[in-house]
């Protein structure tokens, strides 16, 4: 080959999809600070007994890594069904559960199966900023309705929006991110009824990534599964279980809906190591859930403290609090960062979101906010 043929005359242009041009990858800031309260992690690391049991399970899985993992992971799905019955009182079969590498991959499976060119996914803003990216990545049209000033969802508006756009997928976060707002069962039922009348069918996904943190009396959409085959409820082990680094998300739905996800998943998508870690953690669910109660108490106390200082705070059923409003929220965010406290600049203009941390982390946040905002 001659030198002229080996070297293009002009730089080669990559055939990137037009809708991806100029887009930055998703991700919250990852900064080395004393108090990272920006991505809704569980601040408590697993106990030494959990660490030991996970390590033993991983060691056992490692002995078989020359073989592909269990493709349908019925053992893990059985354990998840057992956990959900204890947590929510809803009895499910393993065939009604699905798992993947974080709830992000779960949502991608849903859009791969039920979205696509010529189809629409719908949600109600403000809500989780990854939803439109799932739609974009699967060439699904994306539309949003609105939430009310208190971030609740008007059932009449929800119905009208569904009737107008005829989506094939509706995504409802409950508790909602970034607001922390949970949906009453009556609102979910209104959405389910509207979706049932969409020509061609419509799947409703209730994203309960923060479901374990809901306040007493706040229902789980799991209770509605038996009567609604077009409903799916997604959960994650990242938050309540404190396993954000393990990347385990899961979904509960009718077996036919789960089978549709099995069609689009990559072969052997859930590694043997991931399955081992998840099952070992689920065996300690009672211990891990005990931490959830303390985080709920810390959240509620933080809401009270913020309101007592004249700030507007959204009711929260999650492990974070959305508060405001500030004329220059960026300045508040930057000031907190200079005090070693990292929170999230997200949501409607003027609002900020802080994750619930340990009492020591929360105290550091309070002290910094008082100084920076002059409360």
Image (cartoon, helix red, strand yellow):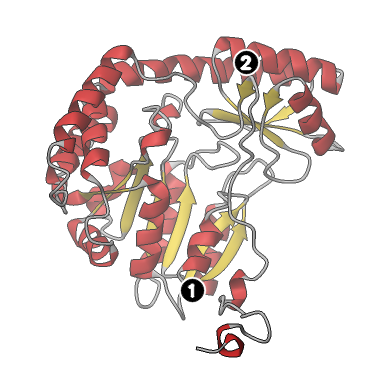
Q: Which residue is mark 2?
A: 362
Q: Position of residue 106 (x, y in %)?
A: 36, 53
Q: Residue at x 64, y 19 (%)?
A: 34
Q: The C terminus is located in which quarter? A: top right
Q: How many labels, in total?
A: 2
Q: Is residue 39 visible?
A: yes
Q: Residue at x 40, y 16 (%)?
A: 291
Mark 1 residue element: loop
Mark 2 vs mark 1, CA separation in Å: 41 Å
* Circle 1 residues within 10 Å: few <14, some 14–19, many ≥20: some
Location of residue 326 (image quadrant): top right
Mark 2 residue element: helix
Q: Which residue is mark 1?
A: 139
> Are the residues tagged 2 and 1 within 8 Å (C-beta)?
no
Dot placed on the residue nearer the N-terminal end, 2 or 1 = 1
Nearer to the camera, 345 or 158? 345
User: Which mark, by number, is residue 55?
Assistant: none
Q: Position of residue 118 (x, y in %)?
A: 46, 81
Q: Is residue 68 above or below residue 110?
A: above
Q: Is residue 233 above or below residue 139?
A: above
Nearer to the camera, 295 or 342? 342
* Circle 2 residues within 10 Å: few <14, some 14–19, many ≥20: many
Taking the image as shown, residue 178 lies to the left or right of residue 168, namely: right
Q: Is residue 285 above or below residue 25?
A: above
Taking the image as shown, residue 137 lies to the left or right of residue 157, namely: left
Q: Residue at x 79, y 22 (%)?
A: 310
Q: Position of residue 349 (x, y in %)?
A: 77, 45
């Amino acid at each position: 080959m001659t030198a002229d043929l080996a070297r293009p005359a002009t730089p080669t242009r990559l055939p990137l999809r037009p809708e991806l041009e100029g887009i930055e990858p998703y991700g919250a800031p990852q900064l080395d600070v004393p108090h990272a309260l920006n991505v809704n992690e569980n601040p408590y690391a697993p106990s030494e007994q959990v660490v030991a049991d996970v390590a033993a399970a991983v060691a056992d899985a490692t002995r078989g890594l020359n073989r592909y993992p269990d493709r349908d992971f019925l053992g893990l799905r059985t354990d998840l069904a057992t956990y959900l019955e204890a947590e929510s009182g809803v009895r499910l079969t393993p065939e009604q559960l699905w798992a993947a590498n974080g709830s992000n991959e779960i949502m991608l499976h849903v859009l791969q199966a039920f979205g696509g060119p010529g189809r629409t996914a719908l949600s109600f803003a403000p809500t989780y900023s990854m939803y439109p990216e799932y739609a974009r990545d699967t060439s699904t049209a994306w539309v949003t309705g609105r939430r009310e000033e208190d971030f609740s969802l008007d059932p009449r508006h929800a119905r009208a929006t569904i009737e107008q756009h005829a989506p094939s997928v509706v995504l409802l976060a409950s508790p909602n991110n970034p607001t922390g707002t949970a949906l009453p069962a009556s609102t979910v039922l209104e959405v389910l009824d509207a979706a049932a009348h969409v020509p061609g069918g419509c799947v409703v996904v209730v994203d309960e990534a923060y479901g374990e943190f809901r306040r007493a009396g706040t229902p789980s959409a799991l209770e509605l599964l038996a009567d609604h085959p077009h409903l799916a409820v997604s959960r994650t082990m990242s938050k309540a279980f404190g396993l954000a680094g393990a990347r385990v998300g899961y979904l509960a739905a009718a077996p036919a809906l789960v089978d549709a996800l099995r069609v689009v998943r990559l072969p052997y998508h859930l590694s043997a190591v991931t399955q081992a870690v998840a099952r070992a953690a689920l065996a300690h669910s009672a211990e891990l859930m005990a931490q959830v109660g303390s985080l709920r108490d810390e959240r509620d106390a933080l809401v009270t403290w913020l309101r007592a200082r004249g700030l507007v705070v959204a009711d929260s059923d999650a492990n974070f609090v959305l508060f405001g409003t500030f004329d220059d929220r960026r300045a508040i965010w930057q000031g907190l960062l200079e005090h070693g406290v990292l929170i999230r600049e997200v949501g409607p203009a003027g609002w900020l979101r802080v994750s619930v941390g340990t009492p020591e982390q929360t105290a550091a946040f309070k002290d910094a906010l008082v100084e920076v905002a002059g409360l």
